[in-house]
Image (spheres, rainbow, N blue to C red):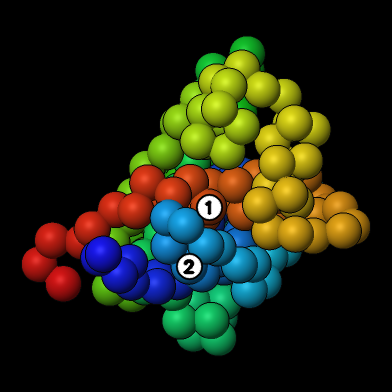
Amino acid sequence: MIKQSIQRVMGIDPGTGRMGWSIVEGNRSKQQLVACGCIEIPLRERHSQRLFEIFEELEKLIEEYKPEVAAVEDLFFFKNAKTVIKVAEARGMVMTLMEMKGLHVFDYTPLQVKQTITGYGRADKKQVEMMVKSMLKIKGSIKPDDAADAVAVGLTHLIFNQVLRGK
């Protein structure tokens, strides 16, 4: 029997006003939540200032929790073109920071996350959160929703059990 190695993953649910983050640890068969939260920046701040503040907060989290890899949710369809552009900029900044810190970045679409966590690609947020709580044996809720989404993204990476090449 091959023993699966333990990996520490930073999961990210990108956003500009609120960015969900998580630190999960484990492998394909066993996972645990180390920490999660949400970086919230007032929308009255300039967009560039919000990106900078998110950058600084994520940098502190990386230093504190020392993840080995990052899992970042891909963008999905937005009705508002301005919103998708700003979130894409935030996502690009996150990916750049992760690479700067030596973390390999893995992308997961919302469909992949839902399929991996619930077994159903069209699951709603409540179904995903319920399965995340069940997998991690968490009694209460994971709040805010952005943090719960980031936990799901991190768990998706552990379940996919990606193997890093060259590390």
Instruction: Name the residue carrying label 1.
Output: 155
Which quadrant of the figure has residue 36?
bottom right
Q: Quadrant of the C terminus?
A: bottom left
Disc on res. 22: none
Q: Nearer the viewer, residue 28 or 58?
A: 28
Amino acid identity at mark 2: Gly
Q: Does residue 55 appear anywhere in the picture?
A: no
Residue at the bottom extreme, as displayed: 64
Q: Does residue 154 appear anywhere in the picture?
A: yes
Measure the C-alpha gap from mark 2 to mark 1.
Answer: 9 Å
Sequence-first tag of 2 and 1: 2
Q: Residues within 10 Å of mark 2 (few under 14, many from 20)?
A: some
Discs 2, 1 touching: Cβ within 8 Å: no
Residue at horizontal 30 percent and vertical 70 percent from the top: 3
Amino acid identity at mark 1: Leu
Residue at the top extreme, as displayed: 79
- Nearest-to-viewer mark from 2 and 1: 2
Compared across the picture, whether 68 is left or right of 152 comes to: left
Image coordinates for residue 166, horizontal then vertical, percent? 10, 67
Compared across the picture, whether 115 is left or right of 45 comes to: left
Secondary structure found at label 2 = strand
Secondary structure found at label 1 = helix
Image coordinates for residue 123, horizontal then vertical, percent? 66, 22
Q: Nearer the viewer, residue 71 or 63?
A: 71
Residue at horizontal 86 percent and vertical 53 percent from the top: 141
Q: Nearer the viewer, residue 8 or 88?
A: 8
Disc on res. 26: 2
Residue at the left extreme, as displayed: 166
Residue at horizontal 23 percent and vertical 58 percent from the top: 163
Q: Quadrant of the N terminus?
A: bottom left
Residue at horizontal 69 percent and vertical 36 percent from the top: 128
